[in-house]
């Protein structure tokens, strides 16, 4: 049985590697198996300063937007060659498999494993080991952080596939059963309850202590910030289910919005950005060394059309078209390199937004303001302002994150004329297409519900770059922003070009090692079919 060794990049790496902490197999049937090589230090030796559990956290934090051990190729398959394209953010200037690949809906089985396997091996595995070592009882505050990270990591996985193994994880046996998404989300909310209650109690009893500081790649051990993230994550998940379970969504959303519950992310100091311990941003290598990542045409349409101040922070000008930004349509028949290398790439040369050590962004406060704006639009209590006020705060927070001039911020918010532009491919006119919407930026209180929602989600989408996983989820949930459809659809009728791809098929590895349970999981899907065109549980029309 193959073992995968955990490499822990922290000040404790030498200690933990000496302890011989071993990882789990890539297949789900081996979830609970960890081996410890007795080569020196005992568990008791490692308990000093919580090293025996704390050393797992750098790996967990680094493996959500995966680049643990700086294995950029894993991230490319985990997200860059699926969600980053489906979200309308990015597109490779490369004809992978003759342009018949996941981005044109010709699903490549081997490309669909990474999102699943990486999360179980590098997040769920270490968290289970923390629990096995008694962390839940010995250090409940550390366990609370583990729960927040677990929910952050695994909601991304279930939002890709639908049903996944969750409640059965770590229970032993040779297989692992799948839970429905409804049950998984129920557990998410309960785990966030535990995390919030535990951290608030710890802060109240120990206001000056920061025992997690040396393991923390986000907040330097500040539990008040982790509480804000916990609540903000709850609000994200509550909004995610607002169409499928209106009552539960409102209850969970209002719990997150309750000012007595610890607060939400409110400024850019609260942003969830993972850095340190030698962690590198995977996009930098994909852009500069591999030349496999360019601007998406949908980004060009909105950002150029809106004269968006963030545009030069997000992308470099197209090297082959001086003074212009050019993107590539998802699923386009891209010519072999170097033709499309002349199009825009994420900003590595001009403003140098992306470097080797740019922090990895998981959630920003602008998203929370847009979540609050939607909560107010839906009539939830304690949103903290009118829909317009929160919408404009979201824009302001995002533009401030990217150091926009205050005058530029005001001008942008009050722009009621700029609209997305038509797309023109200078290399292939077959890819040309008219803009999908005439949406302007300035709030209009006279608009109907859907037009207001389109404004909120469009600006939320712009502010979330480059985190394509969340952007794809929100596009599927709402249909916004109105992205260009895929140029070539090679799904053989599995995916409707108009509504675009809805999920990834279950990993081929699971059909090999956990076949009976996968077949049961398929029956939990809305169409009872393991198809990229099958909508997820929360992916339903507005009631």
Image (cartoon, helix red, strand yellow):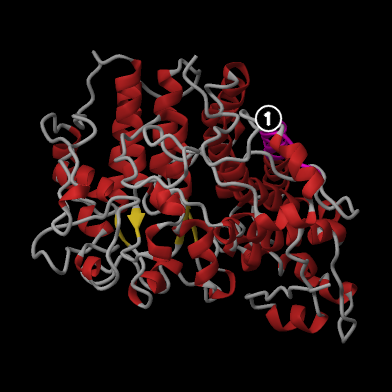
Q: Is residue 187 left or right of residue 134?
A: left
* Magenta stretch prevailing secondary structure: helix
Which portion, as a residue range, is magenta? 177-193
Residue 314 spot, x, y in % from top left:
28, 57
Report which quarter residue 32 is drawn in.
Answer: bottom right
Q: Nearer the viewer, residue 91 or 374?
A: 91
Q: Nearer the viewer, residue 192 or 89?
A: 89
Residue 176 spot, x, y in % from top left:
82, 48
* Residue corresponding to mark 1: 182
Residue 532, above or below 467: above
Q: Residue at x 77, y 65 (%)?
A: 53
Q: Residue at x 47, y 72 (%)?
A: 280
Report which quarter residue 217 is drawn in.
Answer: bottom right
Kindly tell me whether residue 271 is visible in this rendering. no
Q: Is residue 186 magenta?
A: yes
Residue 541 spot, x, y in % from top left:
48, 20
Kindly tell me whether residue 332 is visible in this rendering. yes
Residue 534, above or below 487: above
Farthest residue to the front: give it.
492
Q: Residue at x 63, y 35 (%)?
A: 529
User: Which structural element holds mark 1?
Assistant: helix
Q: Nearer the viewer, residue 127 or 341?
A: 341
Q: Residue at x 70, y 48 (%)?
A: 147
Residue 133, above or below 86: below
């Amino acid at each position: 049985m193959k073992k995968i060794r955990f490499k822990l990049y922290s000040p404790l790496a030498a200690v933990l590697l000496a302890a011989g902490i071993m990882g789990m197999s890539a297949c789900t049937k081996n979830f609970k198996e960890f081996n410890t090589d007795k080569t020196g230090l005992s568990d008791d030796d490692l308990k000093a300063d919580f090293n025996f559990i704390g050393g797992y956290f750098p790996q967990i934090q680094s493996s959500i937007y995966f680049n643990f051990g700086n294995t950029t190729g894993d991230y490319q398959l985990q997200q860059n060659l699926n969600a980053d394209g489906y979200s309308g953010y990015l597109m490779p200037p490369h004809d992978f498999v003759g342009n018949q690949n996941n981005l044109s809906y010709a699903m490549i089985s081997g490309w669909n494993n990474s999102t699943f396997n990486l999360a179980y091996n590098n997040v769920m595995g270490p968290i289970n080991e923390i629990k096995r070592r008694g962390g839940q009882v010995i250090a409940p505050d550390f366990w609370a952080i583990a729960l927040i990270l677990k929910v952050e990591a695994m909601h991304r996985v279930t939002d890709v596939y639908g049903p996944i193994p969750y409640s059965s994880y770590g229970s032993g046996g040779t297989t692992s059963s799948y839970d429905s998404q409804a049950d998984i989300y129920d557990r998410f909310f309960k785990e966030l309850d535990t995390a919030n209650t535990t951290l608030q109690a710890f802060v109240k009893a120990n206001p000056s202590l920061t025992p997690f500081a040396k393991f923390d790649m986000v907040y330097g051990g500040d539990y008040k910030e982790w509480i804000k993230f916990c609540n903000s994550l709850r609000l994200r998940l509550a909004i995610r289910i607002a169409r499928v379970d209106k009552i539960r969504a409102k209850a969970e959303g209002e719990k997150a919005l309750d000012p007595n519950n610890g607060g939400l992310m409110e400024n850019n100091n609260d942003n969830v950005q993972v850095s340190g311990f030698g962690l590198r941003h995977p996009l930098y290598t994909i852009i500069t060394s591999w030349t496999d990542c360019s601007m998406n045409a949908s980004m060009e349409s909105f950002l150029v059309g809106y004269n968006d101040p963030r545009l030069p922070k997000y992308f470099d000008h197209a090297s082959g078209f001086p003074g212009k930004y050019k993107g590539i349509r998802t699923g386009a028949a891209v010519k072999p390199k170097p033709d499309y290398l002349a199009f825009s790439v994420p900003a590595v040369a001009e403003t140098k937004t992306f470097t080797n050590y740019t922090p990895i962004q998981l959630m920003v406060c602008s998203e929370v303001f847009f979540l609050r704006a939607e909560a107010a639009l839906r009539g939830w209590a304690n949103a903290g302002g009118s829909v317009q006020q929160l919408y404009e705060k979201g824009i302001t927070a995002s533009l401030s994150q990217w150091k926009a001039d205050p005058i530029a911020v005001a001008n942008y918010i009050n722009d009621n004329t700029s609209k997305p532009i038509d797309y023109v491919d200078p290399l292939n006119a077959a890819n040309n297409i008219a803009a999908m919407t005439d949406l302007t930026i300035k709030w209009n209180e006279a608009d109907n519900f859907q037009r207001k929602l389109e404004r909120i989600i469009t600006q939320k989408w712009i502010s979330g770059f480059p985190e394509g996983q969340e952007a794809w989820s929100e596009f599927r949930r709402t249909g916004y922003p109105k992205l260009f459809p895929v140029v070539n659809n090679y799904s053989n009728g599995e995916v409707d070009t108009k509504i675009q791809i809805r999920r990834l098929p279950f990993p081929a590895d699971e059909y090999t090692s956990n076949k009976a349970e996968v077949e049961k999981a398929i029956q939990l899907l809305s169409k009872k079919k393991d198809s990229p065109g099958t909508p997820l549980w929360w992916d339903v029309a507005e009631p």
